[in-house]
Image (cartoon, helix red, strand yellow):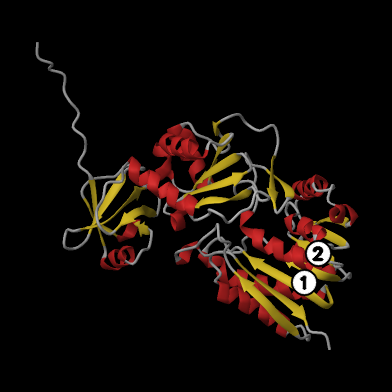
Amino acid sequence: MANDAPTTKPPPRLRLRLSTPAESAVRAGHPWVYADRVQEQNRPGETGELAVIYDRKDAFLAAGLYDAGSPIRVRILHAGKPRPLDDAWWTANLETALASRAGRFEPATTGYRLINGESDGWPGLVLDRYATTLVLKLYTAAWLPRLDETAARIIARLAPERLVLRLSRNLQETARDSFARADGNVLHGTAPEGPVIFQEDELRFEAEVLRGQKTGFFLDQRENRRRVGSLGAGRRVLNVFSFSGGFSVHAARGGARMVTDLDISAHALASAARNFALNSACPAVAACAREAIQGDAFEWLAAATGQFDLIVLDPPSLARRETEREGAIHAYQRLAALGLQRLAPGGILLAASCSAHVTAAEFFAAVRQASARSGRVFEERETTGHAPDHPARFKEAEYLKAIDLQEKQR
């Protein structure tokens, strides 16, 4: 007997054409296609499906993940010659990201980034390691329909004790309502009973992987923390916007005689105290005096009278959108000026910015202007950008920069 049940025909492949500038940008390697740059579309797209982009001559241009609710409508996975984005492609894509970290970290460091979004060919997705715990953070809903298969690939390749899901704030409602997912879900293994402990250059730190900022710790500042550690010997150190005290612990291990953590958050200061305690077996850390001050950084710096030999200024982003850029530049200059007022003769100031809307040139200029107006003579020691495990291969991915200055002794 014939089966008369109707069959559901799959929809045609989602095909897009772009404006001329957007087509040129994709051809040049830019990983984003904005919604207002899509000129033709054969049907409405569903979040998470693969969109294929064709050029004006109807030749394959690129393929990427479609996000129906985002201004970034397509995040490019592959461009150039057409090829199937099958299991073999995904496996190779993962291996490429992992291979770029191979040999960079000794066993003494067990906290670092394994995948850095678009810059590693995984647009809108980052993967961080904290010892035997992996944290997968998503910045686009396009990954939510693919979450099970993505997690399975990661687990099969890396065999973590646990895999934790973190979601950017703009995804959390969609993830809950449409996919029954929540920020902090444990995708594999059991939930940790508290913070996860990992190592950075043999120092021990806690990462709040279920609810902490970013994926639980600021892994991107590792190289700058190392620099502060190398400069700490014999110095009085002020760590402004100290968060969980990473700069301070490195400075103490480097021989600082005193560190002061300044943060508006009591929770952050408590985490910094625990990180100090985690490293109490290190004689230099145990010998270093520590002071914690809860307060607004700008207000405290303006009212304080003490002096410090090494000051770290590492605020959260002061420009979360383009309209805040000018105000942020002025705030960075003011913060540097306040820090320099607290700097002892011959002291060193390290200032950092994580604001993507403020360029490195603008930030460095703000700090240089503050030093020029201080009436003191400073030597610029170094400027730095992204850590090797946080590559930034297109303009919008560039956010981290730091500069350090030391007063010249007459």
Q: Is label 1 in contact with label 2 (beta carbons under 8 Å)?
A: yes
Mark count: 2
Residue 372 horizontal/vertical position (percent): 71, 85
Name which residue lies at 77% across and 62% down: 239
Name which residue lies at 64% across and 77% down: 366
Name which of mark 1 and mark 2 comes first in the sequence.
2
Is residue 53 found left or right of 340 in the rendered image?
A: left
Question: Mark 2 belongs to which amino acid?
Answer: Leu
Q: Which of marks 1 and 2 is in front?
A: 2
- Position of 267 relative to 251 (above/below): above
The one nearer the camera, 126 or 114, is 114
Question: Which quadrant holds the C terminus?
Answer: bottom right
Is residue 409 found left or right of 177 in the rendered image?
A: right
Question: Mark 1 belongs to which amino acid?
Answer: Gly
In terms of secondary structure, where does tag 1 sit?
Answer: helix
In terms of secondary structure, where does tag 2 sit?
Answer: strand
Question: Residue beneath label 1, please?
Answer: 339
Residue 317 horizontal/vertical position (percent): 61, 61
- Position of 358 relative to 249 (above/below): below
Is residue 17 in view?
Answer: yes
Report the disc number at residue 238.
2
Question: Which quadrant holds the N terminus?
Answer: top left
